[in-house]
């Protein structure tokens, strides 16, 4: 008696491998999209410094809001690296990890630059400015403030 041969059972450990050309193509396109997104993000930051009004000086917006957008791009790159690692796309994984490391290093450099530019925390700087701006208290003014008596009658 000739019985039909059963198909092989599902094997979870066998994953399809990506061909090298598809891997390189995916890596190049993802890298291109990420570079365009980063250029658009920081290009918008640079546009904030342009002013049509000659009386208003051009100043840049704080960079941290734009670094959050860059961090979101880095998080998507890390997610792409995790997803492509399951199909053994080594080139894509490496390029996505490089993009993530580059953005994280950019944030670290900006944080370092901010610490150099402002050596004191903002609260300490504000308290120093407030102390310098306050008028000096004299002994006579302090004594006059201490002798204020409540008014018992009406206005006279």
Image: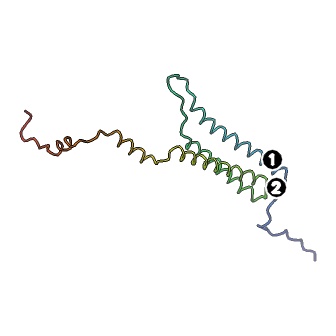
State the image coordinates of residue 144 (x, y, percent, origin top left): 17, 42
Q: How crowded is mark 2: few (under 14 residues within 10 Å), some or many (20 or more)?
A: some
Q: How far apart are marks 2 and 1 (CA)?
A: 11 Å
Q: Compared to 75, does 51 lie above or below?
A: above
**24 on left or right of 96:** right
Residue for point 57% across, 31% down: 49
Q: Which of 133 and 77 is in front in this view?
A: 133
**Residue sitting at 61 percent across and 35 percent down?**
44
Q: Which residue is drawn at 54% across and 37% down?
A: 61
Q: Quadrant of the C terminus?
A: top left
Kindly indicate whether the residue at mark 1 contacts the one at mark 2 (C-beta within 8 angstroms): no
Residue 67 to residue 60: above or below: below
Q: How many labels does the image show?
A: 2
- In the depicted structure, whether residue 131 falls above or below residue 96: above
Q: Residue 25 carries which label?
A: 1
Q: Which residue lies furthest to the bottom in this view?
A: 1
Number of other residues with Cα within 10 Å of mark 1, as a class: few under 14, some 14 to 19, many 20 or more: few
Query: Percent x, y for residue 128?
Result: 39, 44
SS assignment at label 2: loop
Q: Report x, y in % for residue 103.
A: 65, 48
Q: In this view, does 155 lie to the left or right of 14?
A: left
Residue pushed farthest top? 54
- Depth order, front residue of 73/152: 152
Q: In which quarter of the image is residue 81?
A: bottom right
Instruction: Spot the residue most to the front.
Output: 139
Q: Is mark 1 on a helix, strand or loop?
A: helix
Looking at the image, the residue that sits furthest to the right is: 1
Q: Mark 2 points at which residue?
A: 18
Residues 47 and 32: in front is 47
Q: Which of marks 2 and 1 is nearer the N terminus?
A: 2
Quarter holding residue 2: bottom right
């Amino acid at each position: 008696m000739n019985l039909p041969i059963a198909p092989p059972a599902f094997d979870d450990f066998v994953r399809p491998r990506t061909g090298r050309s598809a891997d390189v193509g995916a890596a190049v396109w993802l890298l291109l999209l990420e570079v365009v997104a980063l250029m658009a993000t920081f290009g918008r930051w640079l546009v904030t410094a342009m002013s049509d009004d000659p009386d208003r000086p051009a100043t840049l917006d704080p960079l941290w809001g734009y670094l959050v957008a860059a961090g979101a791009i880095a998080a998507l790159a890390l997610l792409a690296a995790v997803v492509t690692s399951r199909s053994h796309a080594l080139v894509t994984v490496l390029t996505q990890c490089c993009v993530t490391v580059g953005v994280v290093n950019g944030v670290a450099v900006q944080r370092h630059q901010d610490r150099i530019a402002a050596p004191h925390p903002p609260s300490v700087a504000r308290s120093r400015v407030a102390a310098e701006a306050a008028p000096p208290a004299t002994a006579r003014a302090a004594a006059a403030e201490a002798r204020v008596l409540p008014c018992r009658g009406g206005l006279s």
